[in-house]
Image (cartoon, rainbow, N blue to C red):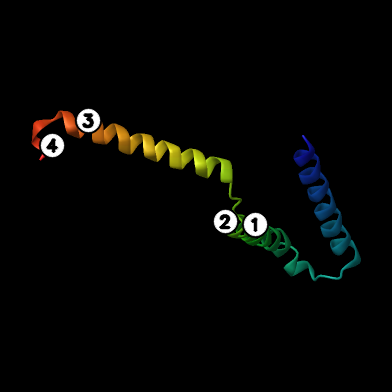
Amino acid sequence: MKHILKIMALLVAVAGIWISLLETSVVPRSYTWLLPVYLVVSLGCYGLLMVGVGLMLFPTCPQEASLLQKVALVIMFISDQFCAQIPAFSG
């Protein structure tokens, strides 16, 4: 719920800035239609940046790593037992 409020506040702020730029004539009227396009492109770049940072700083979990090692040992043990029961694999 907090994220929705943040997004709504951001949209209201952007709309306010856009309307103020239109009313004060800081940006020429011919360029005002480009402001939403710039906003969408910049939000896309921000999203890609956050995904890249999230991938670079991927958290490591030592408990899960040890659990995966135990699972790998169990799989190796079961495969060794299975292969020992089959005459073609027992050598």
Question: Mark 2 is on which residue type?
Answer: Leu
Residue 38 in the image, given as x and y percentages of width and height: 69, 63
Q: Which mark is residue 90?
A: 4
Residue 63 in the image, given as x and y percentages of width and height: 57, 41
Q: What is the CA distance from the residue labelled 2 to the residue labelled 3?
A: 38 Å
Q: Between disc 1 and disc 4, whose residue precedes?
A: 1
Horizontal side, residue 89 vs residue 59: left or right? left
Q: Between disc 4 and disc 3, whose residue precedes?
A: 3
Mark 2 vs mark 3, foreground winner is: 3
Q: How many marks?
A: 4
Question: Mark 1 is on which residue type?
Answer: Met
Q: Please give the residue where the numbered disc 3 appears in the rendered image.
A: 82
Q: Which mark is residue 55?
A: 2
Mark 4 vs mark 3, foreground winner is: 4
Q: Secondary structure at mark 1?
A: helix
Mark 1 vs mark 3, foreground winner is: 3
Q: What is the CA distance from the residue labelled 1 to the residue labelled 3?
A: 46 Å
Q: Between disc 4 and disc 2, whose residue precedes?
A: 2
Q: What is the CA distance from the residue labelled 4 to the residue labelled 2?
A: 44 Å
Q: Please give the residue where the numbered disc 1 appears in the rendered image.
A: 50
Q: What is the CA distance from the residue labelled 1 to the residue labelled 4?
A: 52 Å
Horizontal side, residue 86 vs residue 20: left or right? left
Q: Give the crowd class for mark 2: few <14, some 14-19, many >=20 residues within 10 Å.
A: few
Question: Mark 3 is on which residue type?
Answer: Phe
Question: Mark 4 is on which residue type?
Answer: Ser
Q: What is the CA distance from the residue labelled 1 to the residue labelled 2?
A: 9 Å
Which residue lies at the image location 73% right of the left edge and 68% below the top edge? 31
Q: Between disc 1 and disc 3, whose residue precedes?
A: 1
Q: Secondary structure at mark 4?
A: helix
